[in-house]
Amino acid sequence: MTRPVRLLELVNFLARRAKTIRDIAERFEISERTAFRDISDLSARVPITRTEHGYRLVETATIRPLSLTAAERAVLTLVLGNPALRTTTDIGTTLRGVEGKLDAATRHTEETPSALALAGPERSGRIPARLVTLLEGAVGKRTPVSIRYRSLAGRRTAWRGVDPYKLFHREAAWYLIGRCHLHDEPRVFRLDRISDATAGDGRFEPPDFDLDAHLRHTWGVYRGRELHEVAIHFDAALAPLIEGGAHHPGERIEQLGNGGLEYRVTLSHLGEIARWIVSFGGQARAVAPPALVQIVADMGLLAYERHAREDAPSPAPVRRQQDLPGLVRDAAARQRSFNYDGPNR
């Protein structure tokens, strides 16, 4: 809970009856010193009185309505309606409380139909109730957790010990990142694959961790151990789509003589961008590194073998690439070769 939110909650907490500094510290899980500082800062803005029973809001005090325009209120309503925030019951409950307070504080603001909407879809699966609350508390208190996690790569469910660093939303799903006790390194865990979690004992000293820096050379969330200079050629028909969009903070785009584009980016994992290339069919071609070219070729060959009719002609030899050095010919082996092998096994 951020301090501004805590101060707002403190006003409501003091409105019911007088509270001691200890009451406030226990309610918001802060030190008594921090509770006293909150009361001091709040007293400068809100009429608070001290009685023999503690601190409380002056009975005749009122809080002025938020001074928001209709457009500002519409944007706040839009943000609160984000489908990504509705996938967990923990955040959903909090949002309903915020919405109620926003309605009460802006009841005099003129209502106007909003032209803005967040349509989704949110692709995250079911997240167990109270999971986000437990993990958020562990991040704040710097306490380890045990999670029962279903691994995509290993295809098994097992308990993992984790020192949680951060909860974040990316690629239409919620993730936990922290030091995995099993591998002794930062790993990413998707929340909808955590079926259970318990708080651990003790505390850990968090490193100087920067989530943006950790994800800088990822296409989505998967991070490898070495950097690759990726090059992709796009046909002219896709040039407006690629040139007009933003796909990665580190992307570099150059025009080709045939009207197409060369797209370059530095990544540490190739699986996710390989799937992106394949999604464009034959209008995008992996150029470098050779490992990416092979992964994309393997995906195309496997897709062809799964969908080709028995009487369909074989692909032209120039496109098959079976004879390239190191190419895996067995379909099952090819499937394994480009399965996700990222950090959250």
Image (cartoon, helix red, strand yellow):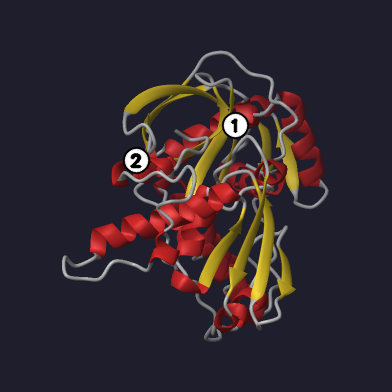
Residue 194 seen in this snapshot: yes
Q: What residue type is labelled 2?
A: Ala
Quarter of the picture containing the N terminus is top right
Image location (x, y in percent) of residue 316:
37, 68
Q: Badge 2: how crowded within 10 Å, few (<14), some, or many (20+)?
A: few
The count of marks equals 2
Q: In which quarter of the image is residue 38?
A: top right
- Name above or below for residue 119 compared with residue 321: below
Q: Quadrant of residue 311?
A: bottom left
Frontmost residue, 28 versus 248: 248
Image location (x, y in percent) of residue 54:
68, 31
User: Which residue is pictured at 58% across the width and 20% down the height?
Assistant: 184
Image location (x, y in percent) of residue 216:
69, 48
Query: Which numbered disc, 1 or 2, marks the residue closer to the eye?
Result: 2
Quarter of the picture containing the C terminus is top left
Asked if labels 2 and 1 touch by Cβ distance under 8 angstroms, the answer is no
User: Can you identify the residue that label 1 sits on?
Assistant: 139
The label number, if any, that marks residue 192 in the structure image: none
Image location (x, y in percent) of residue 201:
52, 14
Farthest-out residue, left: 310
The label number, if any, that marks residue 333 in the structure image: 2
Frontmost residue, 335 versus 131: 335
Query: What secondary structure is found at the residue carrying circle 2?
Result: helix
User: Which residue is pictured at 81% across the width and 39% down the height?
Assistant: 40
Residue 65 seen in this snapshot: no
